[in-house]
Amino acid sequence: MNSDADERALRIDALAKTFGGKQPVMVFEGLSLDVRAGEFLSIVGPSGCGKSTLLQVVAGLLPASGGRVLLGGRDVTGAPAHMVYLFQQYSKSLLPWMTVEDNVIFAFNHRLHLGAREARERSREHLAMVGLQESASAYPWQLSGGMQQRVAIARALSADPKVLLMDEPFSSVDALTRMELHALISELWERKRFTTVLVTHDVDEAIFLADRVAVLSRRPATIAELVATELSRPRRAVETYEDPRFLALRHRLLERLLRKPEELDAAPR
Amino acid sequence: MQRLAKRWTDLVPGALFLLAILALIEFAARTGLVNAAVVPPPTTVALVFAHIVTTGVFVVPVLQTLGTLFTGYAAGCVAGIACGVLMGSFRAAYNLFEPLTEMVRPIPKPALLPALMLFLGLGSTMKITLVALAAFFPVLVSTVQGTRGVDVTMIDMARTFGYGPAQILWKIVLPAAAPYFAVGMRVSLGISLVVIVVAEMLTTNGGVGGALIEMQQQFQVRQTYGWLVVLALIGFGLNALFAWAERRLTFWSAAS
């Protein structure tokens, strides 16, 4: 495939994950998905369907039981450089003994080895992108939840990601903050065009941000549906949510997700 | 919720109570309600203590005690943290060492004195070894707990940014578990002080404990109490120093 040549293209090929033990749990099997270079793709699915596990396998945090993950045509082993993960639990992914600025520096300076001043400048530059230049010398626990997640976003971007994996990063902030963060990530993505995979249980969020939305089936999960949103950009909190196309997609995906398990399994591809 | 910051007025009742107790003892000793030869009046003890301080006789025993204490304590803490991180990080290491530590840990460490005296004599090597043993186990236990408790999200975060196992140990696990090291070290400090004084008393060989038992054996009751005050102040000072250092070094743990 041509897009494989682009190092931002992410290909998930017949991926399988089974958790061992006395009663092995097959989380997903034969799961294939092509994420195009520079694309924003959302993955939604019923809770417990293995969305987060999928993302962790893609990120190299968990070993796959079968199949492959390819980044720019090359096999992903371990945690690849330039693939950055945004965690749901920002309060646990930020280091409490470091200032906000040092938390950001942590993401890049083991690779870039900049001097103290340049590292600081790079850190502040990325904090400015998320509107937090004022909080550079604060500690994460002194900030609100939304601000902490913005620090995590600044940290992720400072590592210069080609692929950004987001594991329900907006699910533990309040509704208005969530919409602000949507606007922020959308704007940053449009500026940088890193390939993005967002895992979420929030259909509105999935459609609002993405170029395409993939729906996972119940366990063992496969891609049940893959739709292009075809909404105009830039996305705007008020207008996009009222777009008839948005509402139609929302209707379709919610209906699919709320269907009973037996109906879902019987549904044609 | 109780306020954490104390106002000076909060200190008044406790101080008055303390003074009242001292006044009561003073009264009882002076009036003969208790035998003043066994329980000397606090004012007399205060004078003896002042004598110990002003003549400088405290310097050598206190330095001996603190020197032995710190050497043994530092060795015990370093070994406890090293073994604890190892056992907390690797299941194999835990399974290997856990039965041994569970056997040795419950032994009251002063009970090891007779055996250690046979091996190492009465000198400072024996005392340092005993203090190190006493300090080791509390630090080990809370380090294992702290190392295991490091949030997997923090470690995964570092992995996704390309940090290797050694870097993760150094930059994530050690700082994240540091508040637990401190908990163990605080317990160990108290035990170490007990153990060093017991060792000095049993060997009657230097240090504040040695001075204490020497005075008691010479029926110098007032002197005995005077040295007790010296010990109390050492304990108080060490605790205050520790609390100060802990606040500075693990400042995020109380706040977050």
Image (cartoon, coloured by chain):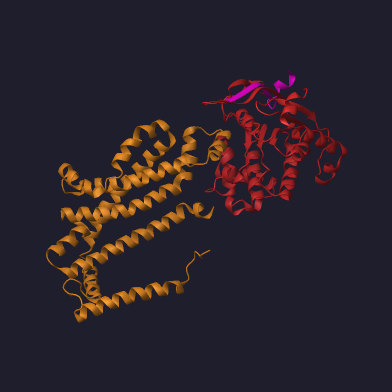
Chain colours: A red, B orange
- Tell me the residue at 74%/43% (across/down): A182
Q: Quadrant of residue B238?
A: bottom left
When the figure is inspected, residue A196 is found, relative to residue B222, above or below; the finding is above
Q: Which residues are magenta?
A: A1-18
| Image coords of residue B249 (percent x, y) | 45, 52
| Image coords of residue A18 (percent x, y) | 58, 25
When the figure is inspected, residue B73 is found, relative to residue B32, above or below; the finding is above
- Tell me the residue at 35%/47% (across/down): B138
Give whichever of A8, A269 is nearer the camera: A269
Q: Is residue B244 left or right of residue A115?
A: left
| Image coords of residue A217 (percent x, y) | 70, 28
Q: Reply yes or no: does residue A8 show up in magenta.
A: yes
Q: Quadrant of residue A30?
A: top right
Give whichever of B9, B126 is nearer the camera: B9
Residue reaching furthest to the bottom: B31
Q: Is residue B82 left or right of residue B193?
A: right
| Image coords of residue B21 (percent x, y) | 31, 74
State whether residue A38 appears in this view: no
Q: Is residue A179 left or right of residue B57?
A: right
When the figure is inspected, residue A92 is found, relative to residue A67, above or below; the finding is below
Residue reaching furthest to the top: A1
When the figure is inspected, residue B59 is found, relative to residue A7, above or below; the finding is below
Q: Is residue B35 left or right of residue B83?
A: left
Q: Reply yes or no: does residue B99 show up in magenta.
A: no
Quadrant placement of the C terminus of chain A: top right
State whether residue B192 appears in this view: yes
Quadrant placement of the N terminus of chain A: top right
